[in-house]
Amino acid sequence: MRRLLLPALLLCACGAPAPGEVDAGVIDAGAIDAGSTDAGSIDAGSADAGGTDAGGTDAGEVDAGAADAGAADAGPNDAGVDAGPADAGVDAGLGPDFVIEGFGAATKGGWQPGFDVYEVTSLLDSGPGTLREGLTNPPGPRIIRFTLDGSIPLTSALLVPSNVTIDGRGHSITLTGKGLILLGSDDVIITNLAIVDVAPDSEDGLRIGDPTFGASERVVIDHVTFRATGNNGASTNVDEAMSIIFGSKDITLAWLRFENWEKVLLVGNGDASQAIDAAITVSWHHSYFKGTGRRHPQARFGIVDLWNDFFDDWHMYGFLFLAPYPESFGAQSQEGARVRVEQSLFRRLNNHLYDTGSQANEATRCELNGKLDGVGLVTTSDSTAPLVFNAGCSGSTGWTRPYSVTLDPANATLRSRLESQAGNTL
């Protein structure tokens, strides 16, 4: 273990948004027809797991090269982004060394005056040189980095304090058995980790917010993989991959990967009043959902802004998930939540054993006065299920995005990038 006290470095601010960014004031209130496949659908052969097919695009497709070559890549530390100065959303002084978009743009994590660098040198659950020790000592802002690769078997969840960055870039680090909890912690950045098989005690992979300590604010979860193997992802064994609760706000989720986890993200769990959870704000972009079940997200109250995500073949995990809820679905808004889903891809197959009689073909839906705007949503042409968009939804959210984003077209290029780059790939 090695701790270094580093001097504060003044980071410059980046320039104006790229030409390809979305106008922050534009809201498209037009929902996709419930029974139709978007005319912009991707050719079945155009993007396999290894990349984009050389055979070209259908006549209705967005051209794979249509993304503005000069626009900044939405993915932190992706090849298109300079890994140097912080962006203009970080005030003068210290800040993260990659671009953050959305509600969490002002998050500094541990990059604050007088921060320490803690190096993890042990893969044990606790003790000298471990991640658990780095989250406990020393007090104050810190950057936690790793000097080795491997799995850390946890016997209890790791509590992440305020003003901390867990930076796994350059290494392959997997947390197993238990996950991470932010007990009202603020200014937290977690990047390039995997959280695998958090079972069998029905806990979350990552929980943000707490009934006792309240909301967490300014949180960024970037390039993290949530994976379950065998039956560990079923809701009888584990709860959400992520939950954001008790009014937590100013959160950005970017370049995440979810595999075989039945319940993905719950926004507001019903244990707090609507007055508290209405403050939740989440931006969620460039993420990949493979073989999951539901809650992409399930949003109660609050605002959730999704763009450039790939919902790939979600399905039922049993004839009943947990009675009486025979359900599987893509993105859901309920109880006054406002959800925007933009320029995203949807793919489902119709041969899953447990889907008969379920709502699994509902790609986006609303319940109990939830509102959802579906903008530029594309059903891939290798999808065989008859997807339904905006089931039960009426009217627009009336919400205007208060920030600019780097928006990629929902096409074969986006699919290939998400399949290969989402998760702990840095």
Image: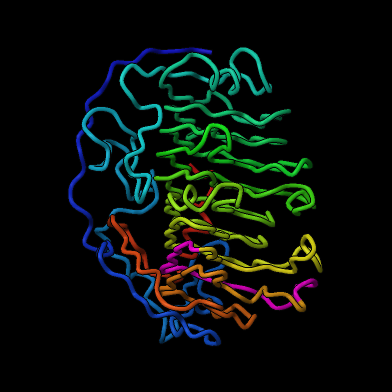
Q: Residue at x 49, y 30 (%)?
A: 166
* Residue 4 rendering spot, x and y as whole percentages: 41, 13
Q: Please give left or right for residue 141 compared with residue 288 in the image.
A: left
Q: Is residue 413 visible?
A: no
Is residue 414 rendered to the left or right of residue 72?
Answer: right
Q: Quadrant of the N terminus?
A: top right
| Residue 121 part of the magenta-drawn span | no
Image x and y of residue 7, in percent: 29, 16
Indicate whether residue 354 is drawn in magenta.
yes
Q: Is residue 369 above or below residue 161?
A: below
The front one of 167 and 213 is: 213
Residue 413 shown left or right of residue 406 in the figure: right
Residue at 54%, 47% in the rendered image: 244
In this view of the protein, can residue 87 be seen by the observer? Answer: yes
Q: Is residue 378 above or below residue 58?
A: above
Residue 232 image point, x, y percent: 77, 48
Question: Where on the picture, by quarter, is residue 93?
Answer: top left
**Residue for point 71% across, 30% down:** 153
**Which range of residues does the magenta coloring cover?**
336-355
In terms of depth relative to the viewer, which is nearer, 238 or 333? 333
Q: Main secondary structure of the magenta part?
A: loop
Q: Residue at x 27, y 37 (%)?
A: 90
- Report the label total: 0
Question: x and y percent of residue 129 in the render?
Answer: 58, 15
